[in-house]
Amino acid sequence: MKVKGLIAVAAVLLATANVCASRPVPTASVDRVPREDWSYDAMIHLAGRGLVPGETSQRFEGNWAYDREEMARFVKQAIETATDATPESDRAILGKLALDYRAELLMLGAGAAYEKALPWAAIKTWTPAGFVAPTLELSGGDLGAFADYRATGLVSPSKYSWGDATFSNVRRRADGDAFSIFDKYFVRGKTEHWEWEVGQDYLWWSPGYSGSMILSDNSPGFLMGKIGADINFGKHIGYIKITEFASSFEDSGARYYLYGRHWEKRFNEKLYLSFNEAAKTTNVKPNPLIFVLPFYLYQDIFRYDVDSDINNMMSIDLWYRFTPRFQGYVDWVVDDMQAPQYLHEGAAWNLPRKTGYLVGGYWPNLLGDGQTSFRAEYIQTDPGTYQATRPGVQGLTYTHDNFVIGHPVGSNSEAFYLRADHKFGSYWSGIAEYLSRQPKESDGPNPFDQSRLSLIATRDITPRGSVSLRYDSFKLPQKEDSLQLSANYSF
């Protein structure tokens, strides 16, 4: 099917009548919350204060990544636990979380919690949050010591705005100097139906857990301007949330621009659909129409001006809750959207297929005891996916500081991802995680196998403190198996 046809199908689906809802509901999302999002910093602090019954701070320190609906459930618990005697700084955070997750709270039937917390958003305060984890590591027969940390200042200057500045060495230690210690910083405003943000932050547009095919937090954060709005198309269609952002960054001394837009629609409690676009350009600033036109159409119209200066991508996400105990989702991406159609026979950009997809399943209550969850994902990408759009323009490879902006497995990949979580009583929890990747084609890029097995056991001591034992087994270049013992403390 031609890509223009697929986009037309997506547009029709997004405009389909919301027959399962009696009235329009703001767009509740099941997109993954990036691991560096301010929500985790806030929940580390609130859980450490005992405001999230049954959960401790370590649940939000990095070993879990939640979607927006899951995070909203924690927010609901914390709001319902808080009282007027709760410190003002904590209530201010809850007020901002209520604003941020308003659509998800309403979808969950937690309108009363939202109304309770909304006045708290007007409290002007700032709150430190974060954690430190001194660690002993045995790797390759050598014993070493280090400390991971994250320190965040959450600022609440007015009811509909807040800021975040985070210092962290977690990604820098694990992934190298491409990740700055000054991890993210932004100012943000949000009302009930629109939002804006300016600063360096991370985005993740997909329900996928191991990564997103078009935009995940695999690469360093972007210095960006972002704006979004929930637009009500009437009682039959309801709300569609439209988000756009523009970013600029330097790689190897050259300037690049990244643009993206996200259309999402939650039809009901079972069905969610989103349509996403991204475009990476060189230092030639595009025509302002790039903010209005679909990127594939923009390139088609202005190809004689920018045919070597733009690489556009499109993705479609579909999530469906089959039963209360099983959810399925698909994330499909097309890179360089003109290539599969052969629109311009004989042109230099007439390239082979460049697509990728992720198919996943999630069992949030696998054994029916509320203690075990399981997730499985299959990922496949063509050899040309994320690669430079045309020969001789390598800067248009879909990367930032040599990290793929989309899914971490990169080009030419066939991968399986498995994860199981289990709580053992009130204090112990365990995680088993496995990723196996092989090249899709032996003569394509990234022609190597890789695998990683991680086993994590955690003992909570207090809501703020825990002890963890972690074993990692790698099949990767320059990676050795390791055993880590760490003590985590949040504040």
Image (tube, rainbow, N blue to C red):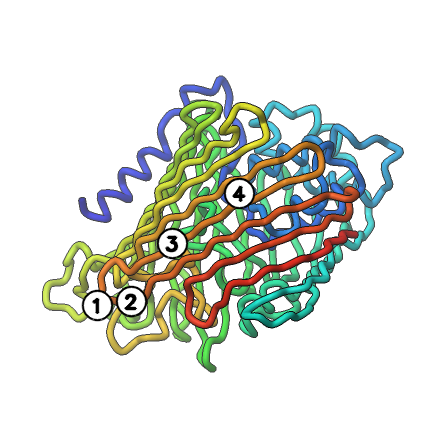
Marks 2 and 4 in Cβ contact (< 8 Å): no
Residue 466 showing in the rendered view: yes
Label 3 or label 1, whichever comes before in sequence order: 3
Q: Can you tell which mark lies on residue 303?
A: none
Residue 39 showing in the rendered view: no
Label 3 or label 4, whichever comes before in sequence order: 4
Helix or strand or loop: what does disc 4 sit on? strand
Left or right of 412: which side holds 257?
right
| Label 2 CA crowd tier, 10 Å (few <14, some 14–19, many 20+) | some
| Label 3 CA crowd tier, 10 Å (few <14, some 14–19, many 20+) | some
Q: Looking at the picture, which amino acid does disc 4 mark?
A: Ala
Helix or strand or loop: what does disc 3 sit on? strand
According to the picture, the residue beneath numbered tag 2 turns out to be: 447
Identify which residue, 440 or 260, lies in the foreground.
440
| Label 1 CA crowd tier, 10 Å (few <14, some 14–19, many 20+) | few
Q: Percent from the top left, x then y, of residue 445?
A: 28, 68
According to the picture, the residue beneath numbered tag 1 turns out to be: 443
Residue at image location 59% in from the left, 60% down from the top: 483
Quadrant of the rendering where the N terminus is positioned: top left
Mark-to-mark CA distance, 4 and 1: 45 Å
Q: Looking at the picture, which amino acid does disc 2 mark?
A: Pro
Residue at image location 35% in from the left, 56% down from the top: 437
Identify which residue, 22 or 388, lies in the foreground.
388
According to the picture, the residue beneath numbered tag 4 turns out to be: 229
Please identify, in this view, whether the residue under mark 2 or under mark 4 is nearer the observer: 2
Marks 1 and 2 in Cβ contact (< 8 Å): yes
Residue ranking furthest to the bottom: 253
Residue at image location 26% in from the left, 62% down from the top: 383
According to the picture, the residue beneath numbered tag 3 turns out to be: 436
Label 4 or label 1, whichever comes before in sequence order: 4
